[in-house]
Amino acid sequence: MNPASIKKSCAVILLLCPLLLAACNQTRQLAPVALQPIARAPQASLEQAYAAQRAQQITHVDYELAFTLDETNAFFSGKSIIHFELVDNNKAPVTVDFNSGTIKSVRLNGEAIEWRYEQWFIEFAPELFRAGKNTLEIEYQRPYATAGDGLHRFKDPATGRVYLYSNCEPYNANKMYPHFDQPDMKATYKLLVNVPADWQVISALREQKITRNGAQQLWEFPQTARIPSYIFPLHAGPYRVWEDNSGSVPLRLFARQELAQYVNPQEWFLFTQQSFGFFNQYFEQPYPFVKYDQLVVPDFNSSAMENLGAVTFNEFFISRGVKTRVERMRHGNVIAHEMAHMWFGNLVTMEWWNGLWLNESFATYMAYLQQAKASEFGASVWDIFYFNYKQLAYTMDQQVITHPIELPVLNTAEAFTNFDAITYGKGASVLKQLAQLVGEENFRQGVASYLKKYAYQNTQQDDFINEIARASGRDLSSWSYTWLAQAGLNKIQVQYQCDSTNTSITSLKLQQSSPVDFPVLREQRVQLGFYKIDAGKAQLVKRLPVTYSGAATSVDAAKGLACPDLVFANLDDWGYVRVELDQKSLQVVREKIHLFDASLRIMLWQNLWDEVIDSRISLIDFLSLAKRHSVQEAQVEVVAAITAKLKLVRDYLQLMNTPEKNLASAQQQLEQFVFANMNAAAAGSDVQKLWFDSYVYSASSNDALPWMRVQLIGDKHKKLPGLVLDQDRRWALLVRLNQYEYQDYLALTAAEQKKDGSDMGVQMALASEAVRPQAGVKERWLNNIIAPEQEYKLATMRLVMANYLPFSQAQLRSVYVPKLLAALPEMSKNRYERFMAGFFRGIFLRGCSDASVALLTQTRDQSLQLHPLTYRMLRVEVQEDERCVEMKKLL
């Protein structure tokens, strides 16, 4: 069949059978087909099959939105005027998405009409509409959101000021106003907002008029370009504002008045200007929109969100102390990530949520590329990428829940579950590899061509891949299949022979293997690094780029090179692959890892941790290697990587600690080692801060607890020299004192709460309570966690759950983990996805025993009707518990 016939056939199949939708993912919907229409299911999520039908039924959408917002009510009111053209599509009912509001009135083309509200959408009989242009007017009320999605309301506990912001991805704009909430139904927006006179209102464009009416003001905004609903912004409140510019683009930064003293606007604007300078040139077109605002908002559910011209950021980017270099880099990285979306996502938008991976992966890769090329951080940002994003991806890609980068998304509930490490970390790693494979300049030209060709349109994965293929002159169809349509993490190992005098290499090949469940071998371009140890130094004697594929690839260019002490098969981290060292190289790493350059040290430490996870060396062995080779480590990125691993060591030791297997001495060794490194670090340095944070996380002994108390209230001569104990670190100390009920912890916590009346202070006081090893406390918070109605907002519950059942409280865990497991089916049925994601992120249900594995397995298998998110996280818990049991056998 020719391409046009294939596309038309897929459109027919789509309307006949939603279950065959995945077969049409790579094709475009064309003209509507006169078949029996798909009925919309009465449920919170939107099905892709129905969304595809509606996109054929309704075109040329324009919105006029009006909102009345205030500082006293728990609800807001609005009016949504929807202009659109109706295409005759076999008389399918028209539905408008709107979740859990109250409909006040509906008019169609000026006349009142009948309608039916299904809680999640409004349905209209098709005969009410005329073919061609229609105007639908809906007046409504809706409660403000308290869980961060839709139009969220926050009231500052110290000042009483109210702040509002919107958050709409992936399917939450319908929690703010009635409309067609899907990414391929782009529309223009005009906006009127009535608010208290002292409020700011921020949207995609700058306001064109403000009219004062007593204590209120009416803000009018002009019509936007055509944009998808998930990036439409509406933020309002008495925000503090700072202003600057980037060339002709005006910049503004907003934050709560209560946090204004901690904001560093110069750094925000610097990172923003650097990103603009890089992207305008890289994409070969200037920023496509009018202005660029950034808002730092409370209770945010993620790091940031790329709302058009009004990006929102989590308040954890405002530090109440001095940021470390790594923290500053991460801050700049998120600024660059969200800005990249202005082109890739906002200008050119995915057709459906199966394209989410490319949207997020591209922004992730571009943010690191921008920082590496055009910031003070330089190439070291790739070290952070490696031990942060990429390691999360490697971990998930080896779990039972791994999936292809590109996969069918049958509904918006599935879209939510795909905001994961495969979507972000693996996808970005694969794009980085693709740039190496085709050449970075070819990749850049392909991206620029894609953005020009599809500006203000919706696209699919092949549109992007085809532009890269054209720019590079390569056929990427096989590459696309093996990398994007197949799951799993490959391994690579260098096998080589040297001559009889051990002087030079006589043969070398790369051996590639794949997981049993995902038997696919991939093409990849990497660098081999050949090292010699000489005079107490590790010398890189040769970089050798290699493109390999299949099970074995001979590398003739290696013949004659000096016989190495270590060969590393992924130098500079070009590839997405797990490196397995040959025995000689592994022995060198165990004995001399400290001699290698910083970037390679980070990767080699990961190799050693992989040995632990695979039960080839014990946690005690790893701790011994850390004690031997990381004493006085001065490179901050390396220290960040090592301390992250040591926190995992602490968790495992506490989880595995039982009367039958007493690991107290190992925990004491870890504590003493971290304490020594903290004291050896330069006073006031970033390295000192990292070791301090690691010590507070790891320590629990009779020596550690009084030392922590001294840091809070003791003589200044007994405090850690050079460390400024900011408010967030003070709370970290208090959480630990509460965890072990040390001395006057209750009085200290009450005093701190009185001193810090901020929202974070209130939340940390509750976290300090939840962590206490008291049955009454655990019972109270258990009831809050499993209750149908929440006493506290989601942001507070996430923090509480992260501290509720620490691994040190083995006896309490044995009582409350089974209770939580018993409550899971009902929780899964009644709780929204973000709560359940926070639950599994904060509370680990594993117990590192055969009995706990059996209990988790039983819960997983007896609860087949669990929400997809809950079921998949239970699968992970079972797998990780089984892994822990195997690791424990080595102790």
Image: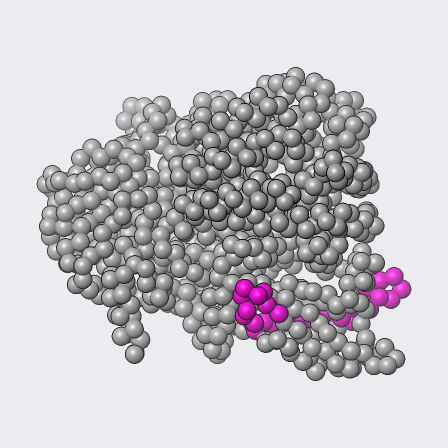
Which residue occupies 81% across, 26% down? 717
Q: Is residue 58 shown left or right of residue 668?
A: left
Q: How is the image coloured?
A: one colour
Q: Position of residue 691 (x, y in %)?
A: 74, 41
Q: Is residue 739 shown left or right of residue 834?
A: right
Q: Position of residue 217 (x, y in %)?
A: 31, 30
Q: Position of residue 435 (x, y in %)?
A: 55, 68
Q: Position of residue 663 (x, y in %)?
A: 76, 39
Q: Can I make out residue 63 in this image? A: no
Residue 540: say if magenta.
yes
Q: Is residue 546 shown left or right of residue 474?
A: right
Q: Nearer the viewer, residue 509 or 337?
A: 509
Q: Is residue 75 shown left or right of residue 302?
A: left
Which residue occupies 18% across, 40% down? 116
Q: Count how many numbered circles sit on residues in the image.
A: 0
**Which stretch appears magenta?**
513-541
Q: Nearer the viewer, residue 228 or 370?
A: 228
Which residue occupies 33% across, 31% down? 143
Q: Can I make out residue 537 in this image? A: yes
| Residue 372 placement: quadrant | bottom right
| Residue 456 placement: quadrant | bottom left
Which residue occupies 55% across, 22% down? 757
Q: Is residue 476 above or below residue 404?
A: below
Q: Nearer the viewer, residue 412 or 239?
A: 412
> Looking at the rendering, in which quadrant would you find the N terminus?
bottom left
Residue 72: say if magenta.
no
